Image (cartoon, rainbow, N blue to C red):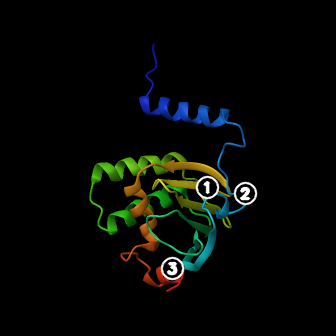
Amino acid sequence: MTQSFCPDRRIILAGAVAFSLMPLSVRASLKDGPKSVVSDAQKLGTGRFSYLGMTPFTVTLYAPEGQYTPDNPFAIQLIFQRKIKASRIVSVSVNEIKRQGFKDAAKLAEWRTQLESFMPTMEKNGDITGVRNAQGHAIFYLNGNQIGAIRDDQFSRYFFGIWLSEKSRSPALRRQLLGV
């Protein structure tokens, strides 16, 4: 009996093999913090995200020379204050993107699948950083090591908008991050 092999699995497997064959010097990392991937990155602001009386994580925004503009590179670092399952992180992220007004169900499903492919369960004091690069891609790092990327500037705008958009669930946190 032959076993069917999902084309998506082949793509994921090919990517994993290609990544594992890269020299360590080529793999992106944040060993020196966001400054290693965002030129002249400086901390712009920090705040605590609170929801229903809990603070699941603290958030810090880094931008070149401390000047944030949504179309230029920047980094958002989250340090988790408690354990949160990967499925919960992905679900909340997609729901927050929808809450901002994004309605394309097919694109949301695609982004959910991409996030699920690399998003880990976060442990207390775990550090995940999302970087919006010059091409508009979102690149994710876990404790300094790249774990995934979504190469879609529309995703980047809405994902980082969870904290930085005027439609953010937490306007006070947004102001803290932007230093306004």
Amino acid bearing label 3: Leu
**Percent position of residue 173, x then y:** 50, 81
Give whichever of discs 2 and 3 has the lower sequence position. Answer: 2
Residue at image x 66%, y 44%?
27
Q: CA distance from mark 1 to mark 3?
A: 22 Å
**Amino acid type shown at disc 1:** Tyr
Q: Which residue is mark 3?
A: 178
Marks 1 and 2 sit apart, C-alpha to C-alpha, by 10 Å
Secondary element at tag 1: strand
Whether residue 44 is situated above or below residue 147 in the rendered picture: below
The reply to whether callout 2 and callout 3 are in contact (CB within 8 Å) is no
What residue does disc 2 label?
31
User: Looking at the image, which residue sits at the far top?
Assistant: 1
Sequence-earlier tag: 1 or 2 = 2
Could you tell me which secondary element the residue under label 3 belongs to?
A: helix
Q: Quadrant of the N terminus?
A: top left
Q: How many marks?
A: 3
**The disc labelled 2 sits on which kind of residue?**
Lys
- Tell me the SS state at disc 2: loop
To which quarter of the image does residue 15 belong?
top right
Name the residue at 66% across, 36% down: 22
Q: State yes or no: discs 1 and 3 in contact (Cβ < 8 Å).
A: no
Which residue is identified by label 1? 141
Q: Position of residue 63 (x, y in %)?
A: 56, 70
